[in-house]
Image (cartoon, grey):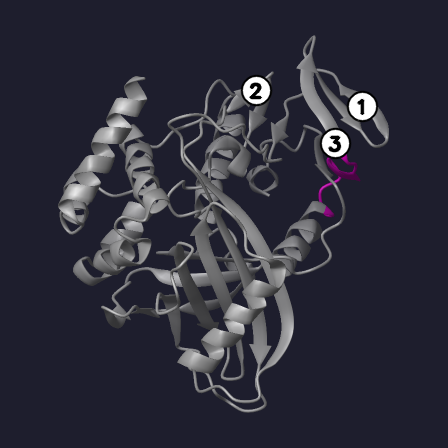
Amino acid sequence: MRMMRSGALNNRSLLLVDKSPKQSNDRTWCFWEQRPGFFEDVVCKKWDRLRFESPDFSGPLQIQPYQYKMIRSLDFYNYCFEEIGRHPNVHVEYWELKKWYKKDGNVVLETSEGEKQFPSAMAFNSIYPAPEKRQNRHYLLQHFKGWWVETSENQFNPDEALFMDFRVEQKEGLSFVYFLPITGRRALIEYTQFTPQLLEPNEYDLRIQQYIDRFTALKNVRVVEKEFGVIPMTNHPFPVNHRGIWNIGTAGGQTKASTGYTFQFIQKQSQAIADTLCHSKGKIKSFPKDAARFQFYDSVLLNILGRQKPGGREIFTRLFEKNKAFDLFRFLDNESSLKQELGIIHSLPTWPFTKAAMQELVSGLV
C-alpha cells in the first residue's frame, strides 16, 4: 500500500503472494495513535477514554493526545485489495509457499504451483518461522479469544473502553480481558493470556462467559462472531535478511517481545522500507532499528513474566497506577526518552527488576 501510494515504483512490477484470499474478519487490530494514520479510512472505532481494572487499582487512564483505535481485518483487506485493483503493475497470486530464497541474483519460490523464478527481484517475507529454542532466551505466547457480542437493547457505553481488566484468575500466568464497546449494543470481549502454553479450545469460551457472569450486568447477550489468535513473545533474534530475502513483520522482529504489540511497529517499518525504496532506486542495504535499550527492557520483563515473581498483574497494575498512560504509550512504542524511562522503571518493584536485569546482562555475555 505504501509503495503504491508513493508513486515512485509505478514503473516496477510488484507481486503479492498469499496462501488464500482474505474474505473473512479473522482478527481485529487495536492500537493508539496521536493523529490520523495511514489506514485512518478503515478505523471503525476510536476511544478518547480508557479504563484500567485490577484488584488493587481501578480508574480512568489519561491518554490524550492519543486515541485508542480499532481496525477490523476484513475492512482492511477490502480497502487494500480495492486499491491494488487500480494498479496494473501490482499482481496477486494465491500460492502455498514451500521454500523461498535467492540464487544467482534471482528470487526463487517453490510453490504449490511449481517453481517460480524472478530475475533481479527483491523479496520481502512475512511468514513467521517458529524458532528453535535457545538457552538464555525467553519464549512466551500471547494467546487470546474474542467474542463479538450484541444485545437487544443498549447496555454498553461506547465512549469508554476497558483497556485491561486484571480481575480474572491468574493461576496459569498473566491473564486479562479487553472490553471494547463499539455501540450501545455491540462490543468485543477478549480473554488474553501471556503463558508458555495454550489453553484447551473450549476453555477460552468458558472464561469469557465466566467474566460476563461475574464482572458485568449484561443480559441476553448474543455471540455473533468469534476470533482467535496467538502472538509470539520472545527475545529470540530474527534475522532481518536471510539468504537474500528481507524479513518483515513478526518474521522480521516487529512484534514487541514483552507485550506482543505489532501493528504500529509494522507501520513504522513499512513506511521506512517504502521511503528507502523510493530514494534509493529500488535498493535496500539495511533496515532502521530501535535503540538497543528497548530490547533490553523487553528481555527483563520477559524474564520476570516467565518466573511470575512478582506476577504480571502486579507489574502492569503498578505501571498504570503510578505513571501517566501517555508516558507508558510512548514507552511501549519505543519512542520514550531516557528520562521518561527512568521514571517508569522507578515505579516498579526494585529488587525483582534489578535481579532480572543482572541475569539478562550476564546471559548476554555468555
Amino acid type of the residue that numbered disc 3 sits on in the rendered structure: Leu
**Residue 63 falls left or right of residue 93:** left
Pointer 2 with pointer 1, Cβ within 8 A: no
Q: In this view, does 244 lie above or below 304?
A: above
Does 87 appear in magenta?
yes
Q: Find the magenta span and give its range.
A: 85-97
Q: Residue at x 29, y 53 (%)?
A: 311
Amino acid type of the residue that numbered disc 1 sits on in the rendered structure: Lys
Q: Which residue is drawn at 23% across and 34% down?
A: 357
Q: Is residue 181 above or below residue 356?
A: below
Does 239 appear in magenta?
no
How many C-alpha atoms fall within 10 Å of the one at disc 2: few (<14), some, or many (≥20)? few
Say whether disc 2 or disc 3 marks the residue closer to the N-terminus: 3
| Residue highlighted by disc 3 | 97
Is residue 95 visible to the viewer in this orientation of the structure? yes
Is residue 182 visible to the viewer in this orientation of the structure? no
Percent across and percent down for residue 97 are 74, 32
Mark 1 element type: strand
| Residue highlighted by disc 1 | 116
Q: In which quarter of the image is the C terminus?
A: top left
Q: Which residue lies furthest to the top in this view?
A: 104
* Label 2 – label 1 distance at C-alpha: 19 Å
Numbered marks: total:
3
Q: Which of marks 2 and 1 is in front?
A: 2
| Residue highlighted by disc 2 | 242
Q: Which of 255 and 334 is in front in this view?
A: 255
Amino acid type of the residue that numbered disc 2 sits on in the rendered structure: His
Mark 3 element type: strand
Say whether disc 3 or disc 1 marks the residue closer to the N-terminus: 3
**Residue 257 falls left or right of residue 330:** right
Q: Nearer the viewer, residue 296 or 41?
A: 296
Mark 2 element type: strand
